[in-house]
Amino acid sequence: MKLYNSTNSPYGRKVRVVALELGVQGNIDLIDTNPRDADTGFWKLNPLAKIPLLELDDGRVIYDSPVICEYLIQQHGNGRLLETTGRDPWDIRVLAALADGAMDAGMLVRLEKTRPESEQSPTDMAKQMATAGRAVDRLQELLADRDDAADLGTIGAGCCVAWLMLRHPSVDWLGARPALARWYERFSARDSMQRTIPGLPLTWSGV
Ligand SMILES: N[C@@H](CCC(=O)N[C@@H](CS)C(=O)NCC(=O)O)C(=O)O
């Protein structure tokens, strides 16, 4: 399989962490991809022009990141990280959706900031940042007492917190949320998280 991805994409990181946690990374080649480049042919694979995308050996393509994660878990993971964790799989999926939503809100602000200033909407950016803040508050409520166990939801949460800190550093995401900070410290020490820190080379070892 081929995983079209980039080192900084939080959605792509989620998929890489899932693959590492399942131990299926040996079956997946990583393809560094700029989804905005019309000349690479990537838009033929994904008309939405977004990464991550998983291309199967028979040429079928799977997107977006929640679908890729479910695919890897069901086809290659015997339900690990979801059905066989001992936690309610729907709670896990909702935690993953919450993390995705916080990233979506942060991503909208980031895209808005790339526009000429006259076309930016400070009101909309503030609204999206407030959404991200509320979502991270909920992450703290849900994760405060958790250990470092990985499931689809905690992986999403870990990638989300890391990305918000990277791309929106003016917000003190963890300073005001000490319980989340403690969980994040535990979780981000996992080998799969350490190998996928944004900015590291896009390899399975991270070096
Ligand atoms: N819902 C999608 C979101 C994917 C997404 O937004 N990816 C970003 C990279 S982090 C992207 O490809 N953006 C294209 C662009 O900015 O033009 C998923 O979960 O895979």
Image: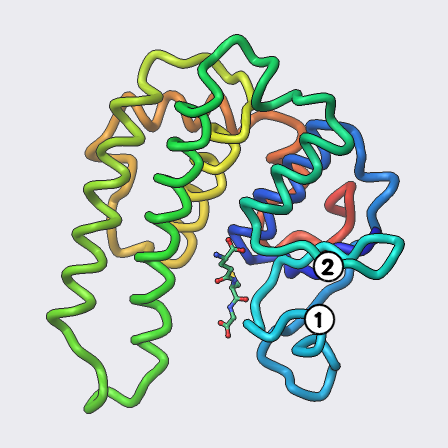
Q: Residue furthest left?
A: 123
Image x and y of residue 127, in percent: 15, 60
Residue found at x 19% / y 91%? 118
Residue found at x 22% / y 88%? 119
Residue 108 left/right relative to 96 = left
Q: Residues within 10 Å of mark 1 (few under 14, many from 20)?
A: some
Q: Residue furthest top?
A: 86
Image x and y of residue 117, in percent: 23, 87
Compute the Cα span from label 1 to label 2.
7 Å
Q: What label does residue 61 carry, if any? A: 2
Relative depth, front residue between 169 and 75: 75
Residue 71 left/right relative to 102 = right
Q: What label does residue 45 carry, if any? A: 1
* Amino acid at pointer 1: Leu
* Amino acid at pointer 2: Val
| Element assignment for label 1 | helix
Image x and y of residue 87, in percent: 47, 12
Q: Residues within 10 Å of mark 2 (few under 14, many from 20)?
A: some
Up-down relation of residue 161 to residue 143 (above or below): below
